[in-house]
Amino acid sequence: MLIKFTLNNKPVTVEAPADITLSVLLRDYLKMTGTKEACEVGECGSCSVILDGELVNSCLVAAPSVMGREVTSIEGIHDADGSPNDLQRNFIAKGAVQCGYCIPGMVMASEALLAKKAEPTREEIRIALAGNLCRCTGYMQIVDAIETTAEERTKNGTNLKRENRSQ
Amino acid sequence: MTEYKYIGKPAQRVDALDKVMGKTKYVGDMSLPGMLYARTLRSDQPHARIKRLDVSPALKVPGVIAVITSDDFANHGNFGFPISDHYMLAYEKVRHVGEGIASVAAETPEAAIEGVNAIIYELEPLPAVLDMDHALDPDAPQVGPDRTDRKHPNFIGHFPVYKGNPQDKLAECDVVSDHQYETVMQEHAYLETEGGLAIPTAEGGVTVYLSCQSPFIPKGHLCSTLNLPDDRVRIIVPPVGGTFGGKDDLNYQTAGQVAALALKSGRPVRMTFSREESIIASYKRGAMRMKIRLGADKDGTLRACEFKSTYDSGAYSSQSPFSSWRASIHAMGAYRYDDCSVDINTVYSNTSYAGAYRGFGNTEVCSGIEQAIDEMADALKIDPIEFRLKNCLKVGDITPHGQMLDESVGLTDCLLKVRKMSDWNRKRDEFANKSDGDKRRGIGVAALFHGTSLGAEGVDEASSTIEIHEDNLITLTSGLTDYGTGARTVYTLVAAEILGVDPSRILVHNPDTNTAIDSGPTVASRTTMLGGNAVRIAVLNLIQNIDWAAADYLQCDLHQIHRDGENYIGPSEEPIPWESVVQHARDMGLVLSAHGRWTAPEIDWDEEKGTGTPYFAYHFGAQVAEVEVDLKTGLTDVKGIWAVHDLGKVIFPQGAYGQLYGGISHGLGYALYEDLDFQDGFAQNVNFDTYLIPTAVDMPEIQGGFVEAAFSKGPFGAKNIAEPSMVPTAPAILNAIANATGRRIRKLPANLERVMLGKTLAKKGSAESCKISLKIT
């Protein structure tokens, strides 16, 4: 079937079977491999994307159900010139990245949180990340990166502004 | 103290940018035109004879291009070190659920699955060894290979440490503690599952992109099992999504399977595992049963330790002979004893199989001995940190193995620092006086020592190469892999410091067996010390030529030159850019590449007498955990962890803290819920919905600290951190639970029922979820 939707602010039309998940659609049919698969049962969050403003596990979303909707994947998170955005720069600066496999999902979960809550506490950040497993970092430096980004966005008055985080 | 420019200073990981952008390509993200997809038929029996195996129906499935079995390998695909008991695909027998039997390559993943399901096979069940305590019974079913030395075929090895006669000494001690401790299997749970991509080469060989730790090992296996000469097999390590010890043996089989399929089909072949397949087929941290007797005087002086243990290696020996040896060396903890004995017996069974996992034997024994030490402190009514301070190893001490510790022993400082950081004394008093209500607080400590690198397990050296290219880019190779640890950043900082150039000029390649030099396995937290030293020596060999060029350019003697940033400055005081000096070296015809090799100090171990010098240096550390236990539900909430480790000079602080926090998360899971439970050989939890690992909510805020007791032979004085970071976490949490509840849990994990009821509930297991997951449809 033809699946039409908006991916990272661009219209996309793709021919794909009706019985695949959004994660397979992104990875195998659109060759956008930034979205990872690590459990395929919705437990690990590696495949996190933002669907109409909500964080979802794309391994649990039927591909045809995104018809006409807006999807943001890790490939859509960057500054206007394609360089890393403030959150991604803070992931690097704070040492939030080790093997990196969970990181695209972590970035998506962080953006989904920061779009809804300007100044989350560390506890609130941890709760927002509870659906995203990381086996390398113990989460400390990931929480640091999100906390710092929230503080900076609040200071710069750029928090909760969608155009800042997704191009 | 030397002031460094890059060593120990803030730095950023060299591979983080691509990872945060989602651009990093792991094996499962790679594809090639015409690439085939592979799947493996896996055993649904814990122990069985392969009575019939007919793969011809698979070849009739549309889209299936090639199928292989053990017949497609030389010597049936036999491999394994130190014991060659393993096969690329099962030969004659299967010994655990999940063992590969045949592999199929097809045009699509769906056709590969259909091909696997079309294979006709019959497994004739054999009696299985499902309890390590019965592995060596005279009539136990044979799991291990045939042997000629009249020892039991299920016996893998005996690993002793002996000093004096602890049995006699224990009889003389004022206080003796005598308890049994038990650990269970732990799953590595790397987020990226196993995978490999094999590409047939023009000259009849094969190149494999393999998510693994030690590429030269599978290279050797492919040469021997596919009858290929050394120059026809190339293993490239792409970015690896975590391993923690777990991407050795099983993924060597993956390499063999995709390579054989690629050679047979003449096309690229990729295999990636589902999570269920990964958990069911992969090796684990092995289970261990320990009996520990400690003896001490009333004044709190430890006198004797007797440690007896059985370690379950499961169906294959894998790395268990080495991890059991490491366990034996660390079994008595980081303490002085007049007399000490350790006896570990390692056995085969049909419960999955055990291999390398972070801590490699020490994690297991530390969970036992550090509880035993706490129980002794309780019996003596001495504060647990005071008791450890009184008895722990210091510079000048002789260990129970007979090794004199002449430098870099920072344990006392670690204990003192962690006591202060955690506000131990106040909390210990406060919690002792609050015993009302359902929620109880407790605080516990555990200490560790951890031998650096391989020790007497094998030859211990590493090599590195460095080259300055025409565009002045500096490239480095190492035979050791950065699978998420930060090793490439460490190498970059070491090279930048010595060369006196900005780190951004340096690119460290991932290992490729065609360009890197075999440096032994990437295990045992040895990359910083071994790989870092190899880089250091390679750079020193290179910089000689650059220095000659600088002296020639500046028309002066070497000693008259100094550096200002990257610039070279001679007597004229005019700064000469690094590039100009490098160009001058080229003009002089000097070579701008070099090689460096570092060999670890020689050490020795007598396997019979149980004495010697097991490791050339040790990491030390101490962790404190604070818990709140809900007596009504048995829920343990870890409120805080304080961790102070002596890792020698810290080269990349942010990376070292990352290792520390990450290791603690593995330890927290090990303490509270991680239990890859096998019932009759079948895994009971096959995905993250039932095998729980810590989330961001489960992890407390961690306060880390470092004691930098420099090791003279480490690069800039560095030792290591990766494995030891997790080793003391579980016993610190268990000791905190005991402090909170007054009840001790001697079998890991301290899950709800053990904390609430003090016992393990009998469970009726089921093979169903395992069988359903294996029956891929």
Image (cartoon, coloured by chain):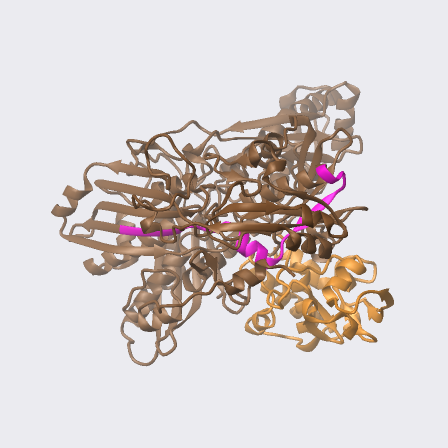
Q: Is residue B4 magenta?
A: no
Task: Say whether residue A23 is visible.
Answer: yes
Tell me: A102 left or right of B572. Answer: left
User: Does B476 appear above or below B525?
Assistant: above
Q: Nearer the viewer, residue B590 or B510?
A: B510
Q: Nearer the viewer, residue B236 or A29?
A: A29
Residue found at x 63% / y 36%: B72
Q: Is residue B286 magenta?
A: yes
| Residue B674 place in picture, x, y as percent | 46, 61
Tell me: B473 left or right of B510. Answer: right
User: Does B116 appear above or below B514?
Assistant: below
Q: Colour of chain A?
A: orange
Which chain does brown denote in the image? B
Task: Say whether residue B486 is visible.
Answer: no
| Residue B629 place in picture, x, y as percent | 37, 72
Tag count? 0
Tell me: B660 left or right of B324. Answer: right
Q: Quadrant of the C terminus of chain B?
A: bottom right
| Residues rendered magenta in the picture | B264-291
Tell me: B43 left or right of B303. Answer: right
Q: Quadrant of residue B226?
A: top right
Q: Nearer the viewer, residue B118 or B11?
A: B118
